[in-house]
């Protein structure tokens, strides 16, 4: 295992926004990965993260619980206030939850009306206890609002100093290009891992436009950490993993060759499976920044070690070729998105070697 590593730093595209080479996705401290973690423990963990060199912290207005729907922003506001000038805080707007479901991922409703963006940014600033949000993402595309209109609001908020940069989560090429023409986009944040590679077709566009790529769920919601088995069970009421296809019992056998590939690379580079999965994407482009989540100090330390693993372009191509040819289970593709009176079933967006099934 790579340990006692020093954090490295990267620039997201051509924006000038400097962040730690590995960020910290904070959603799981409050939402979707079991009951919210102990507030005092998470505040201590976030303080440790800053001391270790983490500067890039990711949250959103909808990361919370039914009784505390904005728990995560509130947590970061309290924990990072003493360190505010040392960190980059990213948050998100443009989603609200549908009526609660008894279990599994809650359905989400996109809402990027200008008046709602204005309301969201003011509330996030208040909860985060700050006068600016360093990177503000549109959480999901709202088909009812044009990218030009959203980008125009972002430009206004930047002129007012309420946000410093903006981005789009789960961006498509057309939407990204149109928005970027109105107000330059600093980064997109999309799902990306060895099991979820369907956004790689955006890489040439990002290179062309000088936009960074922030990878969420870079460890396939934790599956690639080698910490779970076919016998692992999750609380269906509080933990989304209970309904994720990659955690089904049969999936562990389906992913046996993938696990074998990662284990072989881990042995070769004297690293952990998590470090290999992170290093694989970090070595593809200098503007890719993964944001794995954790509640554990040991994982914070482990993840930093991924930056010490240097893979050549040929090694990356060899790994990608093997990933293209081995069988894998389905992988979670996102919460169901409700549009008017029907669902776009992103929940079971499935990546295969050749296509996406929706």
Image (cartoon, grey):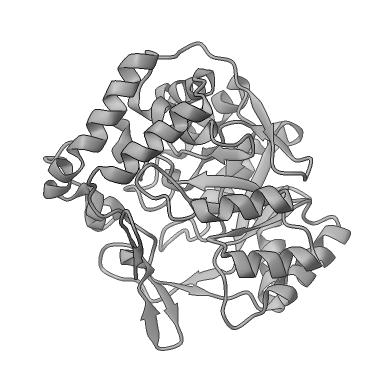
Residue at 61% across / 21% down in the picture?
Answer: 51
Which residue corresponds to the image point at 72% horizontal and 53% vertical from the top-left?
209
Image quarter of the C terminus: bottom left
Report if residue 162 is visible in the image. yes
Q: Is residue 224 left or right of residue 93?
A: left
Dividing the picture into quadrants, the one containing residue 121 is bottom right
Write the residue at 52% across / 40% down.
291
Report whether 332 appears left or right of 251: right
Q: How many marks?
A: 0
Q: At which x and y percent is residue 125?
A: 71, 55
Q: Is residue 43 above or below residue 138?
A: above
Looking at the rendering, which quadrant does residue 269 occupy?
Answer: top left
Residue 248 in picture, x, y percent from top left: 17, 50
Residues 176 and 39: in front is 176
Tell which of 307 and 54 is nearer to you: 307
Tell which of 48 and 324 is nearer to you. 324
Q: Is residue 23 above or below residue 34?
A: above
Q: Residue at x 55, y 24 (%)?
A: 48
Give the quadrant of the N terminus.
top left
Residue 160 visible at all: no
The location of residue 180, given as percent across then percent down, is 74, 63
Q: Residue furthest right?
A: 159
Q: Is residue 275 above or below residue 68?
A: above
Nearer to me, 119 or 321:
321
Q: Residue 280 in the image: x percent, y percent? A: 45, 32
């Amino acid at each position: 295992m790579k340990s006692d590593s020093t954090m490295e730093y990267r620039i997201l595209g051509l924006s000038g926004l400097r962040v730690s080479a590995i960020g910290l996705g904070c959603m799981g401290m409050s939402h979707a990965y079991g009951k919210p973690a102990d507030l005092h423990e998470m505040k201590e963990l976030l303080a440790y993260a800053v001391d270790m060199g983490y500067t890039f912290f990711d949250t959103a207005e909808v990361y919370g619980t039914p009784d505390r729907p904005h728990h995560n922003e509130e947590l970061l506001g309290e924990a990072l206030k003493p360190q505010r000038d040392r960190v980059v805080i990213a948050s998100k707007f443009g989603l609200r939850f549908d009526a609660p479901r008894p279990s599994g991922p809650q359905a989400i409703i996109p809402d990027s009306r200008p008046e709602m963006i204005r309301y969201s940014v003011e509330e996030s600033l208040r909860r985060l206890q700050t006068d600016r949000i360093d990177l503000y993402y549109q959480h999901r595309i709202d088909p009812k609002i044009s990218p030009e209109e959203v980008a125009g609001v972002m430009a206004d908020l930047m002129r007012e100093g309420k946000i410093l940069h903006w981005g789009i989560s789960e961006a498509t090429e057309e939407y990204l290009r149109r928005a970027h023409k109105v107000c330059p986009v600093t980064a997109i944040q999309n799902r990306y891992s060895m099991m979820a590679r369907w956004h790689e077709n955006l890489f040439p566009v990002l290179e062309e436009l000088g936009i960074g790529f922030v990878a969420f769920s870079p460890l396939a919601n934790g599956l690639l950490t080698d910490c779970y088995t076919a016998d692992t069970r999750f609380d269906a009421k509080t933990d989304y993993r209970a309904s994720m296809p990659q955690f089904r019992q049969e999936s562990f056998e389906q992913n046996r060759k993938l696990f074998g590939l990662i284990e072989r690379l881990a042995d070769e580079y004297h690293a952990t499976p998590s470090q290999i999965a992170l290093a694989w994407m970090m070595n593809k482009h200098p503007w890719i920044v993964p944001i794995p989540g954790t509640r554990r100090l040991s994982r914070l330390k482990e993840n930093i070690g991924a930056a010490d693993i240097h893979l050549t372009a040929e090694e990356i191509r060899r790994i990608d070729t093997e990933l293209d040819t081995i069988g894998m289970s389905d992988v979670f593709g996102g919460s169901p998105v409700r549009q008017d009176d029907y669902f776009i079933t992103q929940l079971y967006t499935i990546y295969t070697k050749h296509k996406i099934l929706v």
